[in-house]
Amino acid sequence: MIELNRIYNEDCLEGMKRIPDGSVDLVLTDPPYNIGKAKWDKIPNYIEWCGKWLIECQRVLKDNGSFYWWHNDMVQIAQLMEWIRANTRFVFNSFIVWDKGDFRALAWKNPSEDNNLRSWFNTCEYCLFYTFQDETGLEQILPACFEPYLDYMTSEKNALGMNIKSVNELTGYASIASHWFWQEPQRRQPQPRFIAEQDYRKLQSTGRWKKPYESLRREYEDLRYTHESLRREYEDLRYTHNLDTNHNNVWRSQERNNGKQHPTQKPVDLMERIVKTSSKEGGIILDPFMGSGTTAIACINTNRNYIGFELDKHYCDIANERIQKALAGSDEKGL
């Protein structure tokens, strides 16, 4: 049995086995990059090893859940993305670039004085965002709800050889008719506009559109009810994505070594932003590689539940100490 709001000092490959299928809202993790940052960052058969915890993340994540993982080695990112594409149900959505600022480059020797410098100094890390869904479902399903109404309106118009311009002229408007027939650019609206009775009478004066107005209105309301029911159901099923005020994929947050308790520790504000965007209050967030506990702090600050695993007892103790401070009300917004 797994408990919420706890970091387990154990291998995530063993610990995640106790998490029920489809019970996690968001997986947010910063795994070892296999770049030799420390002893724990040198992993034989790295891609194969990653595949094991990736499969477990897939199993425990809800169908409308989101999955974010950090990395900074482009070759291994490419290899992992291909492995995920070939072996999981995850669908790549987008990626975040963490711009740390240029403070590290300033500490480097002047490039003109070092002929050995032959590449750009990396001041970024990357966070890959996956879900189980693409965004085509709603676009395909919802317009079809109104097809009976649109077929009737359009077939009557076409029977007279009329176009949108001539319908506008008949009813005395400059451009309103495209709303009734849901033609571009109004097709981008969530649903077609139902025609007013006085305008419908003008259409009927042509000898077409013989269906009684009240009957047409009831049919439209029934279709609208179906549309709204499907929309609500779809919103409940699709992954959470709460837009913030600066919704681009380059995030600037200065990395600070002062107070940093783990060599790859992420700023709390970065993790909070992901948590708030891709989960709801009260949701369950899993971090299989909790490190010094930043994901847990982000969850505490945003009223979410967390489950974490950390193999290194030293970092597990640090994480728990930080959590106790956060619960006591200390404001930890930087690192």
Image (cartoon, grey):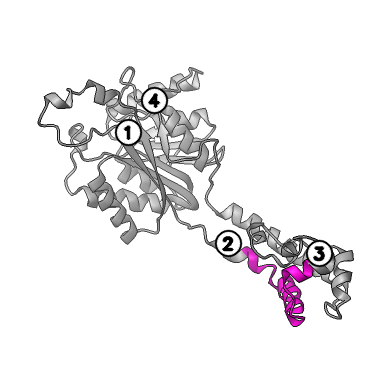
Horizontally, residue 65 falls left or right of residue 255, namely: right
Where does the N terminus fall, quadrant-wise?
A: top left
Q: Which badge, 4 or 3, comes first in the chain's sequence?
A: 3
**Decide: marks 3, 1 in contact (CB < 8 A)?**
no
Horizontally, residue 9 falls left or right of residue 66, namely: left
**Decide: marks 2, 1 in contact (CB < 8 A)?**
no
Q: Which class describes the residues within 10 Å of circle 4: few (<14), some (14-19), or many (20+)?
A: some
Q: Which residue is mark 4?
A: 320
**Decide: marks 4, 3 in contact (CB < 8 A)?**
no
* Residue 1 visible (yes or no): no
Q: Nearer the viewer, residue 3 or 153?
A: 153
Whole-Å distance between the Cαs marked 3 and 1? Answer: 64 Å
Q: Which class describes the residues within 10 Å of circle 3: few (<14), some (14-19), or many (20+)?
A: some
Whole-Å distance between the Cαs marked 4 and 2? Answer: 45 Å
Where does the C terminus fall, quadrant-wise?
A: top left
Q: Which badge, 1 or 4, comes first in the chain's sequence?
A: 1
Q: Which residue is mark 1?
A: 9
Residue 80 picture location, percent across and down: 28, 51
Residue 171 picture location, percent across and down: 84, 66
Q: Is residue 106 above or below residue 47?
A: above
- Going by the numbered disc 4, the residue's amino acid type is Asn
- Going by the numbered disc 3, the residue's amino acid type is Ile
- Going by the numbered disc 1, the residue's amino acid type is Asn
Q: Which mark is residue 195?
A: 3
- Magenta-drawn segment: 142-168
User: In this rendering, which labeled residue sits more in front, label 2 or label 1?
Assistant: 2
Q: Residue at x 72, y 67 (%)?
A: 181
User: In this rendering, which labeled residue sits more in front, label 3 or label 1?
Assistant: 3
- Going by the numbered disc 2, the residue's amino acid type is Glu
